[in-house]
Amino acid sequence: MQKGEARPRQPDHLGGAARGQGGGGGGERAERVPAGVMEVPAGLMLEPSLYTIKAIFILDSFGQRLLAKYYDDMFPSMKEQKCFEKNVFKKTHKTDSEIAFLEGLTIVYKSSIDLFFYVVGSPHENELMLMSVLTCLFETLNHMLRKNVEKRTLVENMDAVFLVVDEIVDGGVILESDPQQVIQKLNFRMNPEPAAYGFVLFDYITGNSEHSEIMSERFYK
């Protein structure tokens, strides 16, 4: 009696678990799966991330908002945003930690005199990346405000603070995490020509330079 010709065995891409525990039924199932295809549990599927920032906000020592920028619709109304900020402040203002988890979000924060700085990311976001954004924001403002990062000087220079935040994060995507690069970019935006008068961006913004009036005339021509 002539023996039947042996069929080549299909490559096993799914491992033993996909073959099943009993009989040929599991083997037939494995052969029906296209070669090279892996089954991924739905729970492990994550949306791609460009190190997305969900929110940045600065509160005073009473938990009142001084600046806030939200980059998605997780809190669509002002009321919801302020409620979230209030809850974050309650959880963090008396602790020495730098990371908190609240409402399924990762929050890194830092305090300075009578200010609290917060950067909010998704629950699976890298805490070190969030911290780099927070550090960049604080160090840039520290340079701008001449190491006097407190409520009064921050409020007096709020336009400059918004410029700094927008240079670091745009639409929730991190653009820059190096304070020196942020300062240089802002200097170029405000004064693209050579600084013939020794112009410095933050001197101009804060009105601390004797050349601020001259540069104001040049800027608004």
Image: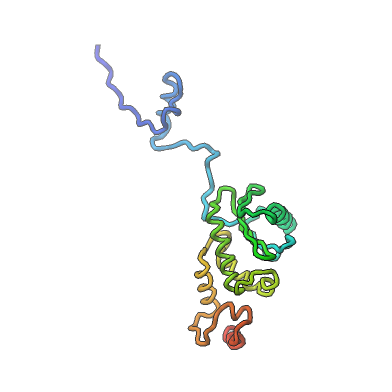
Q: Residue at x 50, y 84 (%)?
A: 195
Rendered image quadrant of residue 162: bottom right
Left or right of 53, for residue 113: right
Query: Which image quarter is the C terminus in?
Result: bottom right
Name the colouring of the figure: rainbow
Is residue 131 something that shows in the picture?
yes
Residue 52 placed where, x, y %?
Answer: 56, 56
Q: Residue at x 56, y 78 (%)?
A: 201
Left or right of 41, for residue 85: right
Q: Residue at x 69, y 56 (%)?
A: 93
Q: Residue at x 53, y 68 (%)?
A: 179
Residue 53 placed where, x, y %?
Answer: 58, 57
Q: Can you name the residue that lies furthest to the top here?
A: 1
Rendered image quadrant of residue 138: bottom right
Residue 151 placed where, x, y %?
Answer: 69, 69
Query: Which image quarter is the N terminus in?
Result: top left
Which residue is at the front of the view, 29 or 145?
145
Which residue is at the front of the view, 199 or 149?
149
Is residue 76 something that shows in the picture?
no
In the rendered picture of this protein, how many numbered marks are placed on residues?
Answer: 0
Q: Can you name the residue that lies furthest to the front here?
A: 96
Left or right of 95, for residue 221: left
Is the residue 130 above or below the residue 1 in the image? below
